[in-house]
Image (tube, rainbow, N blue to C red):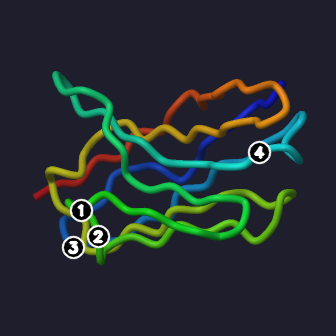
Amino acid sequence: QVQLVESGGGLVQAGGSLRLSCAASGSSFSISVMGWFRQAPGKQRELVATITSGGITNYANSMKGRLTISRDNAKSPMYLQMNSLKPEDTAVYYCNAFDTMSRQLYWGQGTQVTVSS
C-alpha cells in the first residue's frame, strides 16, 4: 500500500508561482513513476507532468516551460514548481504513483489551486 498526501495549493494571482508537494508513505520504495494530474470543474482529469524513479520527466504541452517536476530520491517528496500561472490553470491537482511491486496506481486526495485574474 502507498499513501499519498498533497500540499501547497492555494490562491494566487495570475503570473504568480506555487510549489506543490506530494509525500508518499507505505511501500514507497517500489514506486517507479509519479505524476501530477489536474481536473478543472466540468473537465476531465488531465496529465500535468510525470517523473520516473530514474529522473526522466515529461510535461504536458499546455504547461511546458512553466513547470518543474522533481523528486530527489525514493524517500523524498515529489514537487511541482509552477510559474507564470494563468486563470486557466485553476483546478484540483492530484498526485499519483505507480507501484511496480503491487502493480497498483495510487492517488492522493488532491489540492486546490486557484489562479485569479
Q: Which image quadrant for residue 15? A: bottom left
Q: Position of residue 39 (x, y in %)?
A: 31, 33
Judging by the rendered image, the residue that carries numbered circle 1 is 61
Say whether residue 44 is left or right of residue 95: left
Reading the chain from its start, which is encountered first: label 1 or label 3? Answer: 3
Reading the chain from its start, which is encountered first: label 4 or label 1? Answer: 4
Amino acid type shown at disc 1:
Asn
Judging by the rendered image, the residue that carries numbered circle 4 is 31
**Numbered tag placed on residue 64 in the rendering:** 2
Q: Position of residue 107 (x, y in %)?
A: 60, 29
Reading the chain from its start, which is encountered first: label 4 or label 2? Answer: 4
Q: CA distance from mark 4 to mark 1?
A: 25 Å
Q: Position of residue 8 (x, y in %)?
A: 54, 53
Q: Residue at x 51, y 55 (%)?
A: 50
Q: CA distance from mark 2 to mark 1?
A: 5 Å
Amino acid type shown at disc 4:
Ile
- Labels 3 and 4 touching (C-beta < 8 A): no
Q: Nearer the viewer, mark 3 or mark 4?
A: 4
Judging by the rendered image, the residue that carries numbered circle 3 is 15
Amino acid type shown at disc 3:
Gly
- Labels 2 and 1 touching (C-beta < 8 A): yes
Q: Which image quadrant for residue 6? A: top right
Amino acid type shown at disc 2:
Lys
Q: Nearer the viewer, mark 1 or mark 3?
A: 1
Say whether residue 34 is left or right of residue 99: left
Q: Does 109 appear above or below 66?
A: above
Q: Residue at x 58, y 38 (%)?
A: 96
Q: Secondary structure at mark 1?
A: loop
Which of 105 and 71 lies nearest the eye of the viewer? 105
Of all residues shown, which one is farthest toward the bottom? 65
Q: Secondary structure at mark 3?
A: loop
Q: Nearer the viewer, mark 2 or mark 3?
A: 2
